[in-house]
Image: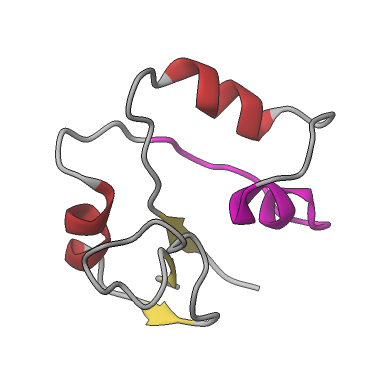
Amino acid sequence: PGTYVYTGSALRTFEAPVRRHQSVVKKMHWHIDYLLAAPGVCVREVLRRTEGECTVNQQVSGAIQVPGIGTSDCRAGCVSHLKRVR
């Protein structure tokens, strides 16, 4: 339980990946797909930033609960792109 921040990238478009992640029926591919399919998980807010995902992730204060989430293409050494903020 808690409030989490997940940072990810949408390099070409923004709306299509967000719609895909929020859809119920989809091929499970990314870490976020599995997270969003878990019971009780809901998206409260989606923010668009101009900075890269690793820069935003490093600006978020929070506790890492599961190392490796969302970092398969990370080149900045992030331990996780999912942080518990409350």
**Residue 85 sits above or below residue 39 on the image:** below
> Residue 20 is drawn in which quadrant?
top right
Asked whether 83 or 32 is in front, the reply is 32
The question of residue 40 being in magenta is answered with yes
The residue shown at (26%, 73%) is 61
The question of residue 38 being in magenta is answered with yes
Asked whether 50 or 1 is in front, the reply is 50
Q: Position of residue 45 (x, y in %)?
A: 46, 38
Image side of residue 22 versus residue 57, left or right: right
Image side of residue 19 versus residue 77, left or right: right
**Residue 10 sits above or below residue 52 on the image:** above
Q: Position of residue 1 (x, y in %)?
A: 66, 73
Image side of residue 56 versus residue 19, left or right: left
Asked whether 84 or 58 is in front, the reply is 58
The number of callouts visible is: 0
Q: Which colouring convention does the figure follow?
A: secondary structure
> Residue 48 is drawn in which quadrant?
top left
The residue shown at (68%, 57%) is 35
Q: Position of residue 84 (x, y in %)?
A: 46, 73
Quadrant that contains the C terminus:
bottom left
Range of magenta residues: 30-46
**Residue 72 sits above or below residue 23 on the image:** below
The residue shown at (49%, 80%) is 67
Q: Position of residue 28 (x, y in %)?
A: 76, 44
**Residue 73 sits above or below residue 13 on the image:** below
Image side of residue 28 versus residue 32, left or right: right
